[in-house]
Image (spheres, rainbow, N blue to C red):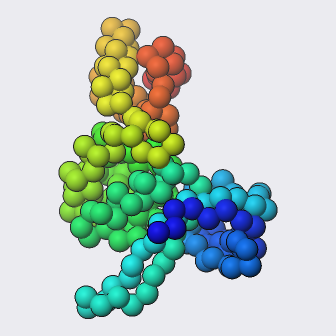
């Protein structure tokens, strides 16, 4: 199985690229995240995922997807393992949000954010959270790991500090969730400082 392709970018669009490797042109479907990472490059390496297309229980073709990072590729593959979530929907999710934002939405059970992606309804959002919550907290590619315990401790400490300062709990939670969605690695001090700017 092809795990990555390294070569010259012959053609680039926000949804696909043609990567030349030893005279072979590989067409890879990509997300906007990957396009942003490679749009100024002439040569690159993309991690790949081969998706088999089925119709009426028969194989009708193959699509090769390319990703700028192992983390994005692994998240894509975990998402399409969920019943009812196809490759197009997973790519749409990764074009709408960064991988860390998707992971954070799953860990925080943010159904609204997941449903905001075209093709994902309430049932699919619940299924994605249910099936992936225990998986995305584990290491993904690039040795990326989001520790639920650390995240929760930082959030709770910042929440308690801001409540002590006299701010309302619902407003604080909303702000902290937004901050952590943008950057899950924020420490307690930064969360409090950034929270104070908004509250």
Residue 62 in percent (x, y) is at 45, 82
User: Looking at the image, which is closer to me, 121 or 20?
Assistant: 20
Image quadrant assignment for residue 74 = bottom left
Residue 177 to residue 85: above or below: above
Residue lying at the far top of the rendered structure: 164
Q: Which residue is drawn at the image coordinates 52% and 67% (left, top)? A: 2
Relative horizontal placement of residue 25, taking residue 61 as reference (left or right): right
Relative horizontal placement of residue 41, taking residue 64 as reference (left or right): right
User: Looking at the image, which is closer to me, 92 or 29?
Assistant: 29
Q: Which residue is drawn at the image coordinates 79% and 62% (left, top)? A: 42
Image quadrant assignment for residue 11 = bottom right
User: Looking at the image, which is closer to me, 136 or 19?
Assistant: 19
Residue 49 to residue 133: above or below: below
Residue 110 visible here: no
Name the image quarter holding the C terminus: top left
Q: How many marks?
A: 0
Residue 166 to residue 80: above or below: above
Residue 40 in percent (x, y) is at 77, 57
Residue 157 in percent (x, y) is at 34, 15
Residue 55 visible here: yes
Q: Which residue is drawn at the image coordinates 27% and 50% (left, top)? A: 132
Residue 23 in percent (x, y) is at 74, 79
């Amino acid at each position: 199985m092809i795990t990555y392709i390294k070569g010259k970018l012959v053609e680039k669009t926000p949804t696909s690229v043609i990567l030349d490797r030893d005279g072979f042109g590989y067409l890879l479907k990509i997300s906007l995240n990957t396009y942003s990472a490679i749009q100024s490059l002439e040569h690159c390496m993309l991690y790949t995922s081969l998706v088999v297309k089925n119709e009426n229980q028969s194989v009708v073709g193959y699509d090769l997807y390319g990703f700028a990072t192992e983390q994005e590729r692994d998240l894509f593959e975990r998402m399409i393992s969920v019943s009812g979530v196809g490759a197009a929907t997973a790519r749409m999710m990764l074009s709408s949000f960064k991988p860390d934002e998707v992971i954070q939405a799953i860990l925080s059970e943010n159904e609204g954010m997941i449903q905001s992606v075209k093709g994902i309804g309430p049932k699919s959002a619940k299924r994605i959270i249910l099936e992936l919550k225990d998986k995305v907290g584990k290491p993904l590619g690039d040795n990326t790991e989001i520790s639920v315990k650390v995240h929760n401790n930082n959030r709770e400490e910042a929440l308690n500090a801001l409540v002590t300062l006299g701010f309302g709990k619902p407003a604080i939670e909303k702000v902290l969730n937004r901050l952590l969605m943008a950057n899950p690695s924020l420490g307690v001090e930064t969360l409090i400082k950034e929270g104070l700017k908004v509250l």
